[in-house]
Image (cartoon, rainbow, N blue to C red):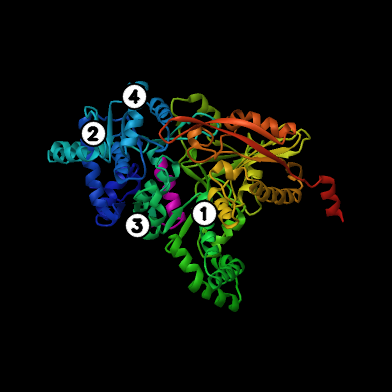
Amino acid sequence: MPTNDSAHLDTFPKLLAYNAAIRAERPAIRHKDYGIWQTWSWAESFEIVRAYAAGLSAIGVRRGDAVAIVGANRPKLYWTVMAAQVLGAVPVPVYADAVADEIAYILENADVKFAAVQNQEQVDKLLSVSDKLPQLLHLFYDEPRGLRDYDHAKLHAIDEIIATGRNLLENHAIRAQIDASIAQGSGTDTSIILYTSGTTGRSKGVVLTAKGCIDAATDTVAFDKLTDQDEVLAYLPIAWVGDHYLNYAQGLVAGFCMACPEASETAEQDLREIGPTFYFAPPRVFEALLTRVMIRMEDAGTLKRKLFHYFIGVAKKYGEKLLNGEPVPLGGRLLYGLGQLLIYEPLKNVLGFSRIRVAYTAGEAIGPDLFSFYRSLGLNLKQLYGQTEAFLYVTAQPDGHIRADTVGPPTPNVEIRIAENGEVQFRSPGQFIAYYKDPEKTAETLTPDGFVKTGDAGFFEADGHLKIIDRAKDVGRLASGALFPPKYIENKLKFFHNIKEVVAFGDNRDFVTCFLNIDLTAVGNWAERNNVSYASYQELAGHPQVYDMLQRNVEEVNRALAREPLMAGAQVHRFLILHKELDADDGELTRTQKVRRSFIAERYQPLIEALYSGKDEEDITTEVTFEDGRKGAISARVKIRNIAVIPIQQQAATKAA
C-alpha cells in the first residue's frame, strides 16, 4: 500500500501508485480520438501501466534497458515511459518529426534495445535504418493502421502487450513481482535520458535521476500552487524537457490531469475544448495566435473593429496594473470591466485561455508588446529560464513581479552565480548527473563545485531578476571592437510579425548583416490585401514590395539600436530575404526551432560573402529534404538590400544637444 510519506515517493511509479490510492477516481489523462474525449482515472492508469509493464517484462525488457519513445502526445506513449520506469528500464523520448538518420543516431548512442512508436510512419523510419541498429530487438506500436501485412516477429501492438500483461497479472506471483519492482526503484535510479536540441552540434543525452526530477517538480508545483484540480494540454514534443517536466512530472506530483490532443493540427481546437488551467507556449505560438486574431479583425465589420481597437487600448492602459494589483482609478476599472464583457473574455474564450491561472513562455525572448498584450487581457503570463540540464526551471517570475525584459529570480532551491566571463551558472535539485557516454562533455559543463555552465551570458538586475543577453560563445565583436550580440539583434527583428526567423552575422566583420525569413501567414495576408500575386514562398519572399516592408522593419530596429550606447555599433547595414524557410529537416534548425548558426554559415557561405562584398544579388542552389525523406534542390537569385544606419557620432551629438 502506498504511503503518503514524501521521502518514500522518490520515483514516478511510486507517485503513480500513490495517486491511484488517494485520487483513484480523479482524471489522470485524457485523449481525443475520432472527435471524442476519452478519460482514464488514476486508478485505471495504474492498472494499465502495471499490465503494460508485465507484458514488456514478458517480451524481455529488463532493469537498465533503454526504451525509445517516438511519436506525438498519446496516452500509450506516456504509459510506455511509466511502464519502463516500473521495470527500472530507462525511457529515451525522440522527436516525432526527426528524420530516420537523426533517430538512428539517438537510438545507437543511447544503446536502445526496444522502441515504442506511434504509427506506421515511425515504424517505417526505424525499419529503414535497422541495419544501423543491430541492438534494437523489438518495436511496439500504438496505431495499427497500415501495419497488418508487416512481419510481426519483432513488431507488437501496444494493446496486445497490455492485454497479455493483464492475463499475466492474474498470477499473484507475477503481480507481486511487478509491485516489488516498483518498490525496488530508488531516487538515485536513472529516470529518463532526454536529448538536447543540438544547437551547437550533435545532440547529447542528458541523464536525470528520479529523485532530482521529483524534487524539482515539487518545488515548482508549490511555487505556482498547482493542485489535482488543475488540467494541462500536452501538445508540445514528448521528447522536449518542457513536456516531461510541465506535464508528466508536475502532473504526477500535483495529481492533475493531462489532456492529449487528437493531432497537432487540432491542438488549438482541443485547447478551447479542454480549457486548461496551466499552460506553456514558446513565444512563436503566442505570436502566431495574435497574428491570426489581428488578421480576423481586419475582416470584421467597422463597428467590431473599432470596438476591438478601442478596448485593446483600454487594456494596454489598465490591464497589467490590475493584474499586478496596482492602483487604478474607478473610471479605468469600469472601462476595463466593460472591455472584459465585450472583448477580453470572448477573445480569451476563442483562444482557449478562459480558465488559465498560470501561463509561461520561454525558449527565446518575447517581444514586450506581445507580452503586454496577453497580460493586459488578464492572462497571468510569466517568463521562465531553463535548460534540459536543469530539468527545466532555473528562474521563474513570481506572481505580481513580472517584467517583459527579464526571466525572473532563481526558482526555489536553485542557486545562480555569474562567472567572471559573464556566464550564468546554476546548481539545482533536478540538475543532470552526466551526459550519456560523454564524460568529456560532462566535465566541460560541470564546475568542480557542482555548478552547471549554461553557456548563456547574463546579469542580475537590482531587483534580483536575471537578464539573459545571448549565448556566451555567440557574443562577438565587430572589427571596430563594437559589441556584436546576434541573438539580441535577431530578437528585436523577430518582434515584427512579418519576420519569422533571423540569422545575424558580424563577428570580426566591418559591419552587421542578416538573413531574414518571412512569416508566410502574415505576409501572405498582407499580399492578399494589397493585390500582390505570388505562386510560391520563394516568389513572395523575393517580391520588391516585401523587401520594402522588411526594410522599414530593419530601419526601425536600427533606430532602436542607435539609442543604446552599447548596441549603436551593431546596426544592420545589409540584409537579404532567404528563398526558403529555415527547416529542421534540412539541419538549419533544431527540433525545438533554434537556429544552428555554424551549419547555416557553412551552407549559405556564398550569400554571406555576397553580403560583405557589395553585391546586389547572388545565385544559390540549396538542397532540401521533403517530408518523406527524399532530397531535392531549390535554386534562386537572392536580392540584397543596403540599409541606412545612424552614425554613432551623430547619435552622440543628438544626445548632447
What x and y, as percent, mark residue 268?
Answer: 42, 55
Is 114 located above or below residue 233 in the figure? Answer: above
Q: CA distance from mark 1 to mark 3?
A: 26 Å
Q: Is residue 215 magenta?
A: yes
Magenta region: which residues?
A: 212-227
What x and y, as percent, mark residue 260?
Answer: 35, 50
Residue under label 2: 156
Q: Pointer 1 and pointer 3: residues touching (CB < 8 Å)?
A: no
Of residues 106 and 128, the one drawn nearer to the viewer in this rendering:
128
Residue under label 3: 228
Residue neighbourhood size for the residue with mark 4, other residues' Cα within 10 Å, grouped as few (<14), some (14–19), many (≥20): some
Q: CA distance from mark 1 to mark 2?
A: 39 Å
Mark 4, secondary structure of its residue: helix
The numbered mark, 2 or 3, whose residue comes first in the sequence reads 2
Q: CA distance from mark 3 to mark 4?
A: 43 Å
Of residues 538 and 202, the one drawn nearer to the viewer in this rendering:
538
Q: Pointer 3 and pointer 4: residues touching (CB < 8 Å)?
A: no
Amino acid type, mark 4: Ser
- The reply to whether residue 54 is visible in this rendering is yes
Residue under label 1: 286
The numbered disc on residue 130 is 4
The numbered mark, 1 or 2, whose residue comes first in the sequence reads 2
Is 279 located above or below residue 598 in the figure? Answer: below
Q: Quadrant of the C terminus?
A: bottom right
Amino acid type, mark 3: Asp
